[in-house]
Image (spheres, rainbow, N blue to C red):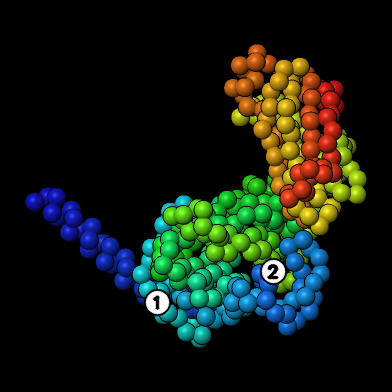
Amino acid sequence: MRRSAVIFVLIFTLIIANICTGCGSSAPNQDNGSAKTESGGSSDAAGKTDASGKSGDAGKSDAAGKTGDASSIPDTNESAVSDWGTADAGTAADAGTAADAGTKNSSGEGGPAPAFSQVLIDNDDLYFAIKDVRSDAAYGYEWKVYVENRTDKNLMFSFEKVSVNDVMCDPFWAEVINAGKKGNCEITWMRDSLQEKQIGDVTRVDFTLNVYNNDDYTEAALMHDPFTVFPLGEDKASSAVREPAATDHVLVDDDNCSVIITGYEPDNSWGYAMKLYLVNKTDRDMVFSVDDSSVNGIMCDPFWADIVCAGKTSYSTVLWDKNALTENDITEVEEISLPLKVYADEDMGNPYVDDTFELTPGAE
């Protein structure tokens, strides 16, 4: 009897919560920023900036479909998913009106309308829209996105090659949306990561949106296209630039790239860390890698590689695992032999850099 009462109370609570959620639906979002896609298609404007920062032709993408029609974003908070998982909502409720836009935010609560919203994809297979942007979210900088899977396949959506203000900065986001379903998701850039990379206001985000069959990884991707989003408007876009420090140890600095050691962390919780600042000065995506490294004359590889997109920079960490150091009886790192290779992402055979650097961390 007690168990039945508990179940009844839980069901009653869920019904009340759903009623409250339905009453708090938000109004259509405003389009106060801009977004661009490099998916291809016809060009109908000028001055477009692509993911590499170069000027090109602007216009809508036939592959991605409509962009910029933010008033069409459905107002629904169903199936809010913020981690790996399956968003399996039913139908979206379009409960808001244009008159409500100034009095409700995206959660349906009182407050200003969203600072930014943008439809990035609207075609027969996919719908992908940024509903709102929050710079003061609980964990950092957050996008609230609404996604529709209009196919008969379960699809995985993910971001690759992500940069913020021209600095590589990945939110490590991925989401499964089942066949014919819709879902709300949160994409979060952690506050600590943004601060470490000296990123203040987010003015530009470049990323590749990858969409593929979650049940058959051998099938060709449904989408693998680059996008550029300007949350504050394209005229506010800026690049985060690191100021040189007296303690920097420059390994490479030429017309193609820069590799700078910014410091060491002997007491890193995961082992021994070397902090790097990487600059890609070319119009090709670059891979920076270390292979066959030794510590104190003993082979001990960090198994490190980092991709830096064209025209971007990166704050990276080369880490020698604590267990590997212990197994080799290395208690203090005195010397590091660092074989460094830098090459274009699709041209490993012609590296920009292929050299070995002998380092003495304690003396630098």
Looking at the image, residue 182 sits to the left or right of residue 157; the answer is: left
Residue drawn 43% across the image and 63% down it: 153
Of all residues, the one furthest to the bottom in this rendering is 99
- Of pointers 1 and 2, the one earlier in the residue sequence: 2
Name the residue type under label 2.
Glu
User: Residue 257, percent across and down?
Assistant: 85, 47
Of all residues, the one furthest to the top in this rendering is 329
- Of residues 7 and 309, the one nearer the viewer is 309
Residues at marks 1 and 2 touching, judged by CB atoms closer than 8 Å:
no
User: Residue 324, percent across and down?
Assistant: 62, 22
- Within-10-Å neighbours for mark 2: few <14, some 14–19, many 20+: many
User: Residue 125, percent across and down?
Assistant: 50, 72
Q: Quadrant of the C terminus?
A: top right
For residue 38, the mark is: 2
Quarter-wise, where is residue 224 in the image? bottom right
Classify 63 as above or below 204.
below
- Of residues 161 and 14, the one nearer the viewer is 161
Q: Which residue is mark 1?
A: 93
